[in-house]
Amino acid sequence: MVYLNRIYTKSGDGGQTGLGDGTRVPKTHVRIAAYGGTDELNSVIGVVLTTELPDDVRRQLTLIQNDLFDLGADLCVPESDKPLGYEPLRVTAAQVEQLEHWIDGHNEKLQPLTSFILPGGSPAAAQLHVARTVCRRVEIGVLSLAEKETINLQVAIYLNRLSDLLFVLAQVCNNYGADNVLWIPGKNRSPNP
C-alpha cells in the first residue's frame, strides 16, 4: 500500500534521491534515468488514452500503464542478495507473454508491410508512434543500466515487446494499416515540378 501525505520532502534538494532499498544515489544515476524514463513513457501513454481508440486498445493501454508502474518499482529496488524485509515487485515473464499475445492477435488483422511506415495518420496512431519511440529510448536506458548493474532482464524484454506492440497498435489505429503513411525512398531527391 502506498501512502503519501506530503508531496515534497526536501530530501532531494542536494541532488540525491532514495532508491526502494533505502540507498541514496545522485539524481543523475543511470538507474534513476531508467525508471524516470518509464514514468515519461507512462505519461505519453496517458496522452494516447485521451484520443479516440478502439475499446480493446484502450483496455490494453490501461493495463500497460499499471505494468509500467510495476516496471518502475522493479527498477527502483536494485537486485541484491541482502534481505530487505519484503519481497520486491518484479516484472514477470507472464507480463511479457501478455504483450506477445496482444501483438499476435492484432497482427493477424494487418496486411504484411511492403514499406517502412512514417509516424502519422490518425491522432491516435501519431501519439502511439511517439510512445513507441520513447519506449525504445527507455529500453536503451535500461540496457545501459544492465551494463553496470544486475537487473531483472524481464524489464528489458518487456520494453522490447511493448515497443513492438505500440508499433502494431499505431497501425490498428490507422484503419488496420490502410491509412498508414508509407516511406517512399528518395522521394524528394529531385526538385518537384
Image: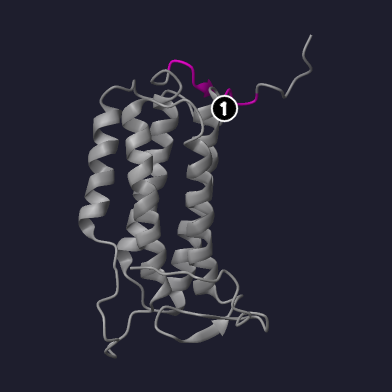
- Total tally of numbered discs in the picture: 1
Q: Quadrant of residue 109?
A: top left
Split into 4 quadrants, where in the image is the N terminus?
bottom left
Is 101 left, or right, of 77 in this rendering? Answer: left
Q: 67 or 168, which lies in front?
A: 67
Quarter holding the C terminus is top right
Name the residue furthest front.
5
Q: Amino acid at mark 1?
A: Gly
Up-down relation of residue 192 to residue 94 (above or below): above
Magenta segment's dominant SS is loop
Residue denoted by label 1: 120
Instruction: Tell me which corner region of the image, top left, top right, bottom left or bottom right, holds residue 76.
Output: bottom left
- The quarter of the picture where residue 90 lies is bottom left
Whole-percent x, y for residue 50 in the image? 51, 34
Q: Is residue 64 left or right of residue 120?
A: left
> Magenta residues?
178-186
Name above or below for residue 36 compared with residue 176: below
The percent position of residue 74, horizontal first and vertical second, equals 36, 69
Residue visible at 38% across and 41% down in the picture = 61
